[in-house]
Amino acid sequence: MLKNVFFSVLLCACFAARADISFESARALVVDEESGQVLFEKNATTAAPIASMTKLMTAMVVLDAGLPADEVVRITREDLDTLKHTTSGVPVGAMIERRDLLQLALMSSDNHAAAALARTYPGGHAGFQAAALRKIEALELENTVIEEPTGLSPNNHATARDMVRILKAASAYPEIEHATSQAQQTILVSGRPRVFRNTNGLVGRPGWDILVSKTGFTQEAGRCLTMRLTAAGRHILIVLMGAMDSWERTLDAHNIQRWLGVPLPDLAAPRARLQPVRKVHKVSVRKRR
């Protein structure tokens, strides 16, 4: 107990000593997970769009349902983006196991994969939304709304405080931890290997021990990032929301690491050598007739 108190006091003192360092993100919250001590906060109770950080909630809702992980799901036109008309995502017609849809939605932030997960949820989109509401209530989130699974809608919003709770809850799922802590994954698409990379460029870099992460970006939300990582011998929960560009978001993350006493290489340093891919997932695409 005394050790925990000493650690929290020490971190708070370090933050106070460096209070002149400003953050570019519009909203931020940094918490020591074990003690619950707030190490830094900025507009942490102001709700704002969360973009693809939504997918952490989507994954938890789907995993809670206990649906067969090896069930093959077909990507259909219903999974296309009709909100912002973006085109990123696995192609219509692709046949993918549910576990791989989760991997794609979380690691590479694939919108089609996230939409397919909600569409094939028991009861369809209505069933997914009802389950998301129950999850919000179970986590006692004070100002969070999840209307759809991808985060493309600006109506999906939360405070940084709520996002810390979401991050902590998501960290209890081994599937989410595994999917979001990989720098890349190779998947066969139409019989050819295709490499999907983590949208969080910090994963795999020297000096970063990232256990769970999720990025997000829309025009309304700005650049967002949430991470659970190991630093200074502790698990730290980080939420950054509303940075103007990815460079500002990355700079904020580096400032937090340095505040925690973690030596980091130059921002331009390459990622650490990637771990060998454990398995290759096959994705088949039906030919149009």
Image: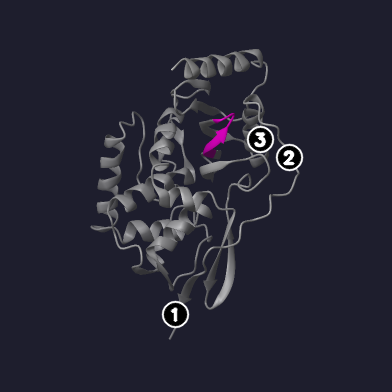
* Residue 122, above or below 245: below
The answer to which of marks 2 and 1 sits earlier in the sequence is 2
Q: Residues within 10 Å of mark 3 (few under 14, many from 20)?
A: some
Element on which disc 3 rests: helix
Element on which disc 1 rests: loop
Kind of residue at disc 3? Glu
Is 182 within the magenta? no
Specify the label residue 258 is tagged with: none
Distance from disc 2 to disc 3, alpha carbons, whole Å, reads 12 Å
* Residue name at image x 50 percent, y 23 percent: 43
Asked which quadrant contains residue 219, the reply is top right
Residue 229: image location, x then y, percent: 54, 37
* Residue name at image x 42 percent, y 57 percent: 102
**What residue is disc 2 on?**
267
Please identify the quadrant where the C terminus is shown. Answer: bottom left
**What residue is disc 3 on?**
248
Magenta span: chief secondary structure: strand
Distance from disc 2 to disc 1, alpha carbons, whole Å, reads 42 Å
User: Which is nearer the eye, 258 or 220?
Assistant: 258
* Residue name at image x 53 percent, y 73 percent: 189
**What residue is disc 1 on?**
286
Kind of residue at disc 2? Leu
Residue 97: image location, x then y, percent: 40, 67
208 with respect to 224 (left or right): right
